[in-house]
């Protein structure tokens, strides 16, 4: 997918899922794998913030099913440890952003 195609898909999924959608792109020499995450819901943020601050990645893994949309290379993400851990790391970044926004207020 080109960057333009990815943005078109993000716009389409934002409407479809009524949520902010974040594209995640993994590029290797062999392939480009694209997945889409929906923004973490308020309820999920509240459930995970305590454990995410202390437990980090294992806590963020619990959000994969909530955030990873069944679109694009979804199955490759679920089956490949490198991609899956990359998605967990992206969710961890999303949680950190939420924590930092809370701290600023």
Image (cartoon, rainbow, N blue to C red):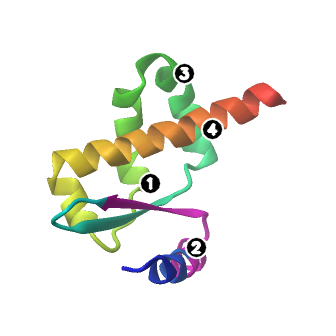
Circles 3 and 2, Cβ within 8 Å, touching? The answer is no
Q: Quadrant of residue 1?
A: bottom left
Which mark sits nearer the N-terminus, 4 or 3? 3
Q: Which residue is mark 3?
A: 50
* Residue found farthest to the top: 54
Is residue 62 visible in the rendered structure shown here?
A: no
Where's the C terminus, which quadrant?
top right
Question: How many neighbours does mark 4 have within 10 angstroms: few (below 14), some (14-19), or many (20 or more)?
Answer: few
Per the model, the C-alpha gap separating discs 3 and 2 is: 28 Å
Find the magenta span and give its range.
Answer: 11-26
Residue at (80% x, 29% y) in the render: 104
Per the model, the C-alpha gap separating discs 4 and 2 is: 20 Å
Circles 3 and 1, Cβ within 8 Å, touching? The answer is no
Which mark sits nearer the N-terminus, 3 or 1? 3
Residue at (26% x, 48% y) in the render: 84
Mark 2 lies on a secondary structure that is helix
Per the model, the C-alpha gap separating discs 1 and 4 is: 15 Å
Query: What numbered label is drawn on residue 14?
Result: 2
Question: How many neighbours does mark 3 have within 10 angstroms: few (below 14), some (14-19), or many (20 or more)?
Answer: few
Circles 1 and 4, Cβ within 8 Å, touching? The answer is no
Q: Which residue is mark 1?
A: 67
Which mark sits nearer the N-terminus, 4 or 2? 2
Question: How many neighbours does mark 2 have within 10 angstroms: few (below 14), some (14-19), or many (20 or more)?
Answer: some
Question: How many neighbours does mark 1 have within 10 angstroms: few (below 14), some (14-19), or many (20 or more)?
Answer: many
Q: Position of residue 9 (x, y in %)?
A: 48, 80
Q: Quadrant of residue 15?
A: bottom right
Is residue 30 visible in the rendered structure shown here?
A: yes
Which mark sits nearer the N-terminus, 3 or 2? 2
Q: Position of residue 3 (x, y in %)?
A: 47, 76
Name the residue nearer the viewer: 24 or 103.
24
Per the model, the C-alpha gap separating discs 3 and 1 is: 18 Å
Per the model, the C-alpha gap separating discs 4 and 3 is: 14 Å
């Amino acid at each position: 997918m080109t960057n333009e195609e990815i943005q078109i898909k993000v716009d389409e999924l934002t409407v479809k899922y009524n949520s902010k959608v974040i594209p995640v792109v993994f590029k290797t020499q062999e392939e480009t794998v694209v997945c889409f995450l929906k923004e973490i819901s308020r309820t999920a943020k509240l459930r995970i913030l305590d454990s995410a601050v202390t437990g980090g990645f294992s806590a963020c893994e619990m959000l994969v099913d909530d955030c990873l949309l069944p679109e694009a290379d979804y199955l490759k993400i679920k089956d490949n440890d490198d991609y899956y851990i990359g998605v967990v790391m992206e969710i961890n970044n999303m949680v950190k952003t939420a924590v930092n926004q809370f701290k600023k207020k």
